[in-house]
Image: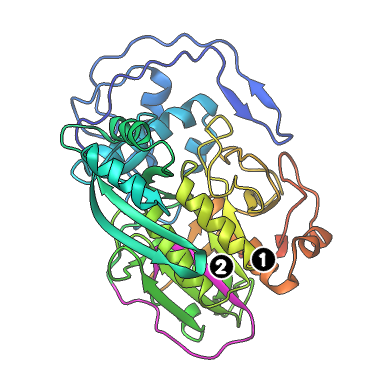
Amino acid sequence: MSSFVRHIVIAVSAVALVAGSGAAQLLPQVSVPAVGPVGPIGVPGVPVAGTVIQQILQQPGARQAVSPTLNSVAGLPRSIAQSGISTLLELRRLRLEELIRSHRNQLESDGNGHPVARGRLITINPDVASLQLAAGAGFFILAEEGHRDLGLRVVHLRVPRGLSARQALQRLRSAAPTIEADYDHVFEPAGGDLLPVAGALAAANVGGGGHKIGMIDGGVASHPSLAGAPIEQNGFAGIPQPTGHGTAVASLIVGDQGRFRGAARGASLLVADVYGGSRASGQASSVVRALAWLIGHLPGVINISLVGPSNKLVARAIGAVQARGTQLVAAVGNDGPAAPPQYPASYPGVIAVTGVDAGGKALPEAGKAAHLDFAAPGSDMAAALPGLGYAKVRGTSFAAPLVAARLALVGSPRGLAAEARPGKGRVGRGIICGACRIEPKAVRAK
């Protein structure tokens, strides 16, 4: 990790820790002296101000909290997850800054800190007159995509030279006031990370029961628990690449090996890889391509363990998927309740899922979506590692697939509500699939 960490100014007059009841518990006032250049994870010369952040970044696993590799499936270490609302918010900012810095040729900020595709904007069902006005303002058509099943036509525009994405969007809206345009935002995994791992993709199998479940994620690797599962994979940012995150999520849905049992064994799993092994991928346009492919296979439920800001194209696509009768389940994220509401979990009609620990208590790092529907196990549990074995996982990414699996089996949110059980803290209508938690010791999880 290079010198991406800038001076952080944090007033930790009251670091809020999320208690089991969901109320904020305040610590006594803490004085935070300035700290000179310190390498937070063993790298000299990286300036950090504030002892709280410095101590957090020196903990094992902090590299994955700020500069994640997609190999990991563990999510935030428990100590970091419980470090306080202000700290989680700063770690989120650092992570997004690092993502942009590490891929500066592909990504830039939208002005609010969210990573977006560099040098291009997306427009939705633009008319000819609006495109002509855009051309007159210096925009150039890069590509055009038609998604008939979603009723969407997406035109990608190259940003005029010398303009940031934010400046370009302002110019476009001024030049063509009726055009529906947005950034091509990047969506991140909501717990764990996504770099490709060595090994093969899970083999494509045919057959399976009548239930079809889709997932938008990274690619799924070969694993004994998935050997007999009907899995079909397709890539929307290049060739599908096996990842730890995608493998873990898939195993929680259809895995079956000894004492490890997914929540919807026997169902057919459709995997849409929107990363192709790169953290710079996962753009809104890739998510929409994935939704278009999945809806053509008529799944009953689609799980999306990804988070990002509200995006006009994704919102339109999700509305079209819902209109066709497919239900969507999404994780609320792990940046704490002070972070902005995450999407797609916050869109109307999407079932937003948080995580709970083994005691049924809401995870302190869980995000706060615009609405919250259910909770499911999200820590103190095991999921498949690419190749062989199992890992301990933590995060709302791993709660969402359990809810998606149960929803596919019971058929409706009303059915889910009927089986929900009380929890501690902010758990929506209750905990789903509490018995689906696989104890790490039972499968010798690492």
Q: Amino acid at mark 2?
A: Leu
- Residue placed farthest to the left in the image? 161
Quadrant containing the C terminus is: bottom left
Q: Is residue 37 above or below residue 258?
A: above
Going 47% across and 27% down the picture, which residue do you hit? 87
Nearer to the camera, 67 or 60? 67
**Could you tell me if the residues under marks 2 and 1 are in contact, i.e. CB atoms within 8 Å?**
yes
In the rendered structure, does residue 90 fall within the stretch colored magenta?
Answer: no
Classify mark 2: helix, strand or loop: helix
In the rendered image, is residue 145 in sight?
yes
Quadrant containing the N terminus is: top left
- Residue placed farthest to the right in the image? 418
To which quarter of the image does residue 109 belong?
top left
In the image, 345: left or right of 167? right
Magenta span: 199-220
Which disc, if any, is residue 375?
Answer: none
User: Label 1, on which residue?
Assistant: 436
Going 43% across and 22% down the picture, which residue do you hit? 52
Q: Is residue 320 above or below residue 174?
A: below
